[in-house]
Amino acid sequence: MNGALLSYLKESGRAIEAYFAERPALPLTPAELQEGTFVYFKRGGKRLRPAICRLAAGALGGKAAEEAAVPCALALELYHNWTLVHDDIIDHDDTRRGKKAVHAMTAEAFAASLSPERAAEYGEDVAILAGDALHSAAVYYLSLLSEGGSVPPAVTLRILSLLEGDYGLRLISGETVDTKWGFLYGKGGFTALCEEEILGMMAGKTGALFGISALSGALIGSGKAEPGEKELALRDFAEACGIAFQLQDDILGLVADEAKLGKPLLSDLREGKGTLLLLHAYEQANVEEKTFLSRVVGGGGTEEELLRARDLILALGGKTYTEKKAREYLEKARLCLEKIPPSPYRDLLEAWRLFMLDREM
C-alpha cells in the first residue's frame, strides 16, 4: 500500500475512534449486546469508507471540511459494521477480522449455561440485535454533524435522507439478491446468472456504501445540500472503486492467506454465491468440468472437492478475467477523479483507487 495512504488511513481511524470516545453512545444491556454491538469497531480494520468520506470532504472543502466530516465518517463506519454483523449470520461465517464473529462469540460465551443449539440460537439473536443497535448508533452520530456549526443542517439532513433512503436500500437490495442466489442457484444453478446481473448486485451490495461515503464527504466539503458535477464525480469514482473492491474481495476469498483475510476461505463456494470468477470459469469449462462445478459449488462438497473447484476456477481463467473487469472499473474511476481539482486529497484518492486491486486483505 502507498505509504502516504497507509498513514492517512491510520490517522483517519484514530480520528473517528477519538470522537467515539468523546461521545460514547448510550450503554446497552445486557452486557453481551454492548460487547457485540461495538466489538468489530474496536477491532479496527481498513476503515476505507470513513477515509473516503473525509478525503472527499477535503478535496472540495480543504482541511476544515475534512475535520468537520469526522462525525459522518464515524457514522458510516458503524453503518458498515451492522452490515458485517448481519452478513456473518447470513453467510454462516464464524470469524471476522481474525476473531470470532459476533454470533459465534456470543454462543461461545453461553456454551456453559445453554445447550449447544440454544447457545447458537441466542448468539444469532444477539448478533441481529447488535446490528440493529449499530444502525441506530450510526444515525445518532450522523445527527451530530451540524452540532459545531461547520456543516449546514440542510446538508446533514440531505446526507441522512440519502443514506437511509436511496443508498441504504440499494445496499440491502443487493445483499438480498446475493443471498437469494445462494438459495435458488446454489447447487449448479449459478449457471442461470449472467455477468450483468452479478455486476448489478455488486453495485448495490458494495458500490452503494462506497458511493454514499464519498458523496457525503463531498456535500460536507462543498456545503451544498444538492450535489453538483464534482460531488457526483466523487460519488461515481467511489462506486466504481467499490465494485472493483468487491471483485478483488471475491478473488481473495479463493486465494488469500486466511490469517491475513480474517474470515474463512472458500465460503462463497460453500454457499453457492454467484461470482464473476465462477461464472467465467464455468463458461470456459468442458462438459466434465461443468458437471463437477455444478455438483460441488453450493452443494455440500467436501473440503478437498472445494479446493479442487478453486484450482479449476483459477486454471480456467476466472481470476484473470475478474482482475481485468476490476481494472475496467478502476479506469472509470480514474476518469471521474480527473474532474476534481488537483490537491493532496486528490493524490490520496488516486492512491486509494489503486489500492482496490493491489490489496491482499
Image: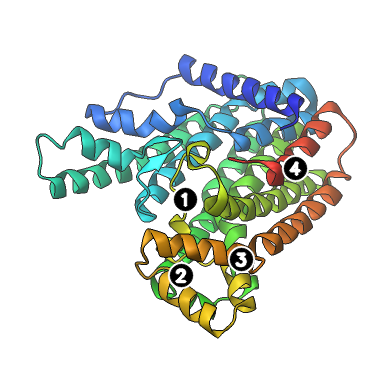
Looking at the picture, which amino acid does disc 3 mark?
Leu
Residue tagged by mark 4?
353
**Residue 147 visible here:** no
Mark-to-mark CA distance, 1 and 2: 19 Å
**Which amino acid, mark 2?**
Trp
Quick check: marks 4 and 3 in contact, CB under 8 Å?
no
Which secondary structure, mark 2?
Answer: helix
From the viewer's perspective, tell me whether residue 336 is left or right of residue 193: right
In the structure shown, which secondary structural element does the residue marked by tag 4 occupy? helix
Residue at horizontal 58 percent and vertical 33 percent from the top: 47
Q: Position of residue 282 (x, y in %)?
A: 58, 75
Dot placed on the residue nearer the N-terminal end, 3 or 2: 2
Q: Check disc 1: other Cα within 10 Å, few if <14, some if 14-19, many if 20+.
A: many
Spatial CA distance of label 3 from label 2 is 13 Å
- What residue sits right under mark 2 in the picture? 181
- Above or below, comparing residue 308 to residue 123 in the picture: below
Position in image of residue 5 (x %, y %): 73, 28
Relative vertical location of residue 113 with respect to residue 3 in this rendering, above or below: below
Tell me whether the residue at label 4 lies in contact with that at label 2, contact meaning CB atoms closer than 8 angstroms: no
Q: Nearer the viewer, mark 4 or mark 3?
A: 3
Say which label, 4 or 2, has the lower sequence index.
2
Q: Is residue 178 above or below residue 128?
A: below
Residue assigned mark 1: 265
Distance of mark 4 from mark 1, alpha carbons?
25 Å
- Front: mark 3 or 2: 3
Tell me the residue at 76%/42% (across/down). Answer: 354
Comes first in the chain, label 1 or label 3: 1
Q: Position of residue 2 (x, y in %)?
A: 75, 30
How many angstroms separate mark 4 from mark 2 (CA)? 29 Å
- In the image: residue 249, left or right of residue 93: right
